[in-house]
Image: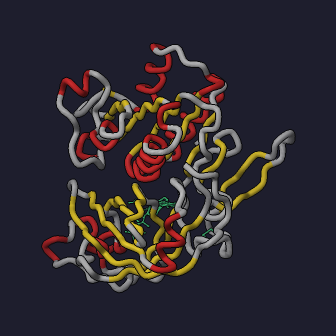
Amino acid sequence: MEERTSGCAGKGVFEAVVVSNRQIGDTFWKVVLEFSGEGAEAFGGFQPGQFVQLDASEAQLPPADKIPEELADAAQRDILLRRPFSFTDVTRHGNKVAAELLYCVVGPATLRMTTLKTRSKVSIVGPLGNGFSPPEGKKLVLLVFGGMGTAPIQHVGKALMTGEKKNDIQIVAFAGAKTRRGLPFEKLTDEISEQLGFSIREFARFGMESMIATDDGSAGYHGLVTDCFTEWLKDNKIDASSTIIYSCGPEPMLSAVAKIAKERGIACEVSMERRMACGMGLCQSCAIECRVEGSDETVYKMCCEDGPIFDAQEVVFGH
Ligand SMILES: Cc1cc2nc3c(=O)[nH]c(=O)nc-3n(C[C@H](O)[C@H](O)[C@H](O)COP(=O)(O)OP(=O)(O)OC[C@H]3O[C@@H](n4cnc5c(N)ncnc54)[C@H](O)[C@@H]3O)c2cc1C
Ligand code: FES
């Protein structure tokens, strides 16, 4: 991983070409976008944790029989604003850059994204926001995430395990979802690998241990991912000072992870989510309440520009 990027240096509006777009689960899809020219220059430096704003307004709606009943009304809404997305992977191929975007179909924009055809073009604004800071001086990286929080976490894990310092760190990932169907992975590994702590192929193939927790017990640990994580911390003696946690997912989960980190004195960064209009600090629609160090006061920071990655102890969680 390169040095942490802050602000939006090198950002712009770029046209990306769709290389592939395929369904990987009930509601999950993966689209691979390719940037060339100035877009490749800008996205060659994309840091795990940063995001883009994608314009899905030109994409067609799927045929009526492919629209889930619960989205039938939402599907008819016009798409006035771009939508924020992270990438799960960014790789350079010669003078082009390919970026993989994992998305969950939840409304009009993501519904339209399912009809993006190979070789069609998409307008992307980015790279936006900051990235996770590199784990300087840390030997153990713990990834705790839920649902669509997978995207930037998968990216940071792969970047670390293929980077210069890959032999100096160990990574353990904890993925949570309500049910097995809510896990946005192509395939889980076989039972033996699962028992050994390598449940998720996307992580196992880069040498990362991974564990799954589902609320209903339909895969992996039966319960919340934060409970699975707490039990692991009890069973494994770790040196807090050489450990860092990166986390992304629903806010109650982030709040619980921040608390666990604080109690054990472990450094922790969280990727926050807000509904975003401009994505670049202009509209003030994505405020996050943050503590001011050494004072009881709080200030509002913009998730899109000051984040989306924040020190977990800085954020005032609502839960
Ligand atoms: C920094 C960032 C990175 C993201 N990365 C990804 C990603 O990699 N993959 C992915 O699938 N999604 C990601 N998202 C969420 C994604 O932006 C939304 O799912 C998308 O905008 C939905 O658009 P839509 O028109 O399909 O549905 P909408 O109708 O816009 O939303 C559907 C439902 O989701 C809720 N919702 C939408 N956006 C948010 C939000 N930001 N916070 C809380 N609730 C929200 C809405 O209130 C509504 O109930 C990210 C969001 C942020 C802020
Ligand atoms: S989305 Fe406009 S300020 Fe953050």
Q: Is residue 150 above or below residue 54?
A: above
Please state if 99 lies on the left or on the right of 298 as rendered: left
Image position of 59 (left or right of 159): left
| Ligand 1 sits in quadrant | bottom left
Q: Which residue of the protein is positioned furthest toward the left in this rendering? A: 65
Q: Nearer the viewer, residue 12 or 167?
A: 167
Q: How many marks?
A: 0
Q: Position of residue 252 (x, y in %)?
A: 52, 41
Taking the view exactly as shown, the residue that stands out farthest to the right is 295
Residue 228 visible? The answer is: yes
In which quadrant is the C terminus drawn? Answer: top right
Q: Residue at x 54, y 63 (%)?
A: 45
State the residue at coordinates (45%, 64%): 85
Q: Residue furthest bottom?
A: 58
Indicate the quadrant where residue 263 lies.
Answer: top right
Q: Position of residue 303 (x, y in %)?
A: 62, 60
The image shows residue 234 at horizontal and vertical percentages of 49, 15
Can the viewer see residue 249 in this picture?
Answer: no
At horizontal 48% and vertical 43% (from top left) the residue drawn is 160
> Residue sitting at 58 percent across and 54 percent down?
131
Residue 176 location in percent, x, y?
37, 38
Does residue 296 appear left or right of residue 88 in this picture? right
